[in-house]
Amino acid sequence: MARRVLIADQTATDRIALKAMLAAARYQVVAVPTGAEARAEIAAGNADIVIADAGLTDFASSGLAEDMAATGTDMPPFIVVTSRSTSDLRAGWLEAGAAAVLSRPIDKAWVLSNIRALLRAYGARAEIARQVGTARKLGFAEPASGFARPRRVALVGASRAAVGRVMQGLSAHLDCRIEALTPTEVLDPATPRPPADLHVIATEDDPDEALWLLAELRSHHASRRAAILMEFDDTDRSAGIRALDQGANALLRRDACPAERALLIRRELAAKVEADEMRTQLDRTLTMAAQDHLTGLYNRRYAMHHLADLVTLRRGEGRSYGVVLIDVDHFKSVNDRLGHAAGDITLRAVAERLQGNLRDHDMVARFGGEEFLVALSDTCPTEAMQAAERLRAALSGAPVVAGGEALTVTISAGVACTVSASPEEAIAAADAALYRAKSGGRNRCELAGPDDFGHPAFGDQGPRKAAG
């Protein structure tokens, strides 16, 4: 099902033009002329993101402004569109709860890049929150720690002038440590400094250098989960579009006043801190009852609870989810020839590579023995197969050293993607596809077809196990 965009704009021509633009991009669009109607659509669950015109006469009186200011994963992000774009006005909208403020005229590429970035960020946040919710249902969740470590912001630029422009006036608005760094300093793994929670990339005449730095920060282990803001010039929106699509959390306009800059930094820093706290809570509270003792992955019990919640969510939204059932090829021979200690090392290496090649909000669990289960949130068959192939390549790409030998480890995978099937039905379908992958020569991925969803329950240890 297409993502749902709600447009609230009392000017008919603007409303119709924006609706046509987004519908052409395969979004499901509802357009209304008042804040009251928009609020009713939100309450009915008909919006993944809201685009509201700043000139709505009943923006405040309808309660739409309260919705925009609300926090929590059940409220969609708001983009406010305005014809009057001064830094003070943008700061006011950001403080009121807007996720982004776009100035007219709005072209298609510009609005679509902002929508994609916000849906990606809010979707990841909602998925992490859902995993914490699963832990609570299992009875493992504990309150978050009251300790808050000092937060660090790195302003990164090739010149002192660029960094100084961004830093000007910030210290009066932010209660955190702010550090000015060069690209070399921030990327040097030998530099003895704690990683920054948020990076602000200052740009100069050549945006390609800043975009390169953004890509590097997103790929480095120490900074891949950091929040990243990139400065941009509104007269060159193409650079801003590229930055959002490459993983920038938000854009910082070059003409922004200190208050606007500080608001964006505080907001993204708060979101990053919230995500960190939720991840820490999961790590701390999902004890051995929810984790596999050997690999550290989730166990089968947790995986089934997770999938049950995922199915309910995706079925309600009309969007599909995917499961990948993975079996380590010829694993018995490793145990027989090199011993169970070598087998344990192999399984831990498999788990580490699987976990390291998935999105943060996807889940991987040890399902039993040498079998692993991956749950892919909000995916289609093509994307699910791409993910499975990426995992297969990650396993076979480098040897695993175990029992004094460098072992080439391969996996076979069955992939199932569905909107309405139960977890048991989806896993059974993936199980049937996995059997074909094993029978077809191993070290391959197979996609489940419609007939596979009538396969016997996944607990059946029949023909697939016999295939080895």
Image (tube, helix red, strand yellow):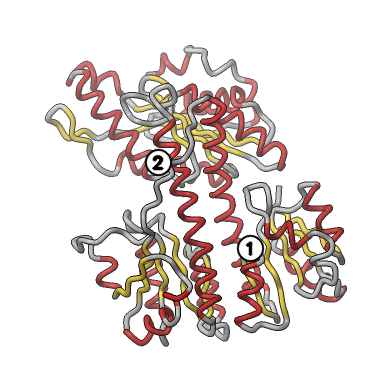
Q: In the rendered view, does 23 fall on the left or right side of 436?
A: right
Q: Amino acid at mark 1?
A: Ile
Q: Nearer the viewer, mark 1 or mark 2?
A: 1
Q: Position of residue 235 (x, y in %)?
A: 57, 86
Residue depicted at x 35% and y 65%: 216
Closer to us: 5 or 468:
5
Q: How many marks overall?
A: 2
Amino acid at the residue labelled 2: Leu
- Residue 54 position in % (x across, y down): 75, 73
Give the mark nearest the N terminus, 1 or 2. 1
x 75%, y 63%: residue = 65
Which residue carries the number 1 mark?
115
- SS class of the residue under badge 2? helix
| Residue assigned mark 2 | 391
Q: Pinpoint residue 96: horizontal percent, then vertical percent.
A: 66, 66
User: Distance between the Cα atoms at labels 1 and 2?
Assistant: 29 Å
Nearest to the observer: residue 144 or residue 192:
144
Residue plotted at (41% across, 79% down):
167
